Amino acid sequence: MRVPIDSALADVTQLSNERRMDLLPRLPPELQVSCLELLRIDERFIASHVSRTWRAVALSSPTLWASYEAAQFKDLEPSLATVLLRSQSVPFDFTWNPRRPSLKMSPILGDMLHAHALRLRHVRFPTSHQAPSDFLSSLLNRATPELRTLDAWSLDDEIRLPESWSSRAMTRLRSLMLGSAILPSRIQAVSSVTSLGLNAPRDCRDLFSWFPCVQEVLLYDVWSTTQLPYELARSTTSFSIYSDAHSRSDHSIQLQALRWRLVPWMRIESAIISGPLEWFTARAGDCWDMTLFLGCFPPSPLNFVMTLRAENKTELHVVIPSNGFFDQTTSIHPHWGINLTRLTLDSISWQLPLLVQHIRTLPSLLSLTLLLVHGLDISAQELRSWNDSISVPVLRELVLEYSVISSTENVVQFVQTVPVFLFWGDRRLEMLRLLGPGIAQLRESDLPFASTFCDTLRLERTKLKDPNTFYWSQH
């Protein structure tokens, strides 16, 4: 009885399929390929086994397999072998970002890539994943005419760049990021490179002879003993130097001895603000502005990032340790806050006391913003106990931005304490703005006292575009 039923079902299914007509084969080939392009490469593997049509499309389109990211696969060696086979001879991109960051690339995977070195286009090892130096050394000694990007910042050992490096060997290389690399004693110029990142050798004076057309430069492990280029290349638009995350260096001393010009983006580290400020203003003239950002970059402590911006949009970014920042600014430049027109503070539980202690007056401040990250960084009781306040005689706008509003009562209490730590005389503020995702819980009727010191109260659910900054306009 079972056999006749199965036979009948099979006949019905076949007839249904014939009458329905599969639309997939009737789609234009370009549209079929576009459908597969919408999928991740691991999903294309699955799609290529759904039907004969999808499989035919997948196998006849090598560009669908022109890139490989280790994070998308569990079986790395078989999957890479299949992708390399299906991509045929088109330029190939490889990214080593396995699901387990500690997983090292096997020699078998390296041999597969070496076999296809002629068509490697972008080779990337994200910072959190170590690149095998043996693999890279062997790769760099091979012909790689298609190579455009080599990003291998975290290496398991030093690698030595081959003596054969030149523009002839690397005709298309645009971006080079290498950590712990030893440069040849007589390196030939590689003029194709426009983006460069290196652990700085002790002597970098010939950097722009090695890479004459570079536009963006990142140099790490730059110390006071590092010999930097005397002048920047004409092509350079961005130049950033770093020391070590655990111990900052003072690059401003080196800066004074170099004939560097202002570029659209420059980044250095300094112990104080005076050196970079003097260097910048000597080149920028009278029209410039300053921004300060307070940030924590683990494992480093809190730092201020001072941005000096000239009228022609060139910028100097200086990382300064937060310890003693206010002491430095008030002792070296006691009037640095005279022209401060906009000020934004985060971490106000410790910034506000420091500001009140060291900077008693901000005579030009027009707008003050306080970022209350956790709803209430400092209690109203603490503020009421203060004996000092900041004089802001021309302040027009006060902004309180909350990331979370757990209690409207806390917000109301905090607003009530504003006149305790801010003093603007007998005049009134033009506007008080309260911002945050839960601000809809509040009504103007909850803050009747606000009308005693401001003309306009505005409740907004939006966020500021430029948080965490001080702004000093020197126009």
Image (cartoon, rainbow, N blue to C red):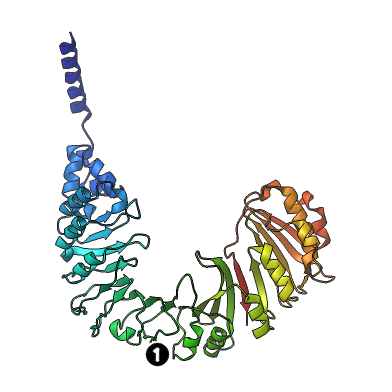
Does dot 1 land on a helix, a strand or a loop? Answer: loop
Q: Amino acid at mark 1?
A: Tyr
Q: From the viewer's perspective, is 115 left or right of 71?
A: left
Can you say whether 218 is above or below 285 in the image? Answer: above
Q: Is residue 199 shown to the viewer in this render?
A: yes
The answer to which of 148 and 302 lies nearer the viewer is 302
Q: Residue visible at 42% across and 77% down? A: 238
**Residue 205, position in %: x, y?**
35, 87
The answer to which of 161 and 408 lies nearer the viewer is 161
Where, quadrant-wise, is the N terminus in this rendering?
top left
Q: Residue furthest top?
A: 1
Q: How many marks?
A: 1
Q: Residue visible at 80% across and 64% down? A: 420
Looking at the rendering, which quadrant does residue 120 occupy?
A: bottom left
Q: Residue visible at 16% across and 19% down? A: 11
Looking at the rendering, which quadrant does residue 92 occupy?
A: bottom left
Looking at the rendering, which quadrant does residue 423 occupy?
A: bottom right
Can you say whether 295 is above or below 231 in the image? Answer: above
**Residue 209, position in %: x, y?**
30, 86
Can you say whether 324 is above or below 285 in the image? Answer: above
**Residue 43, position in %: x, y?**
28, 44
**Residue 87, position in %: x, y?**
18, 54
> What residue is disc 1 on?
230
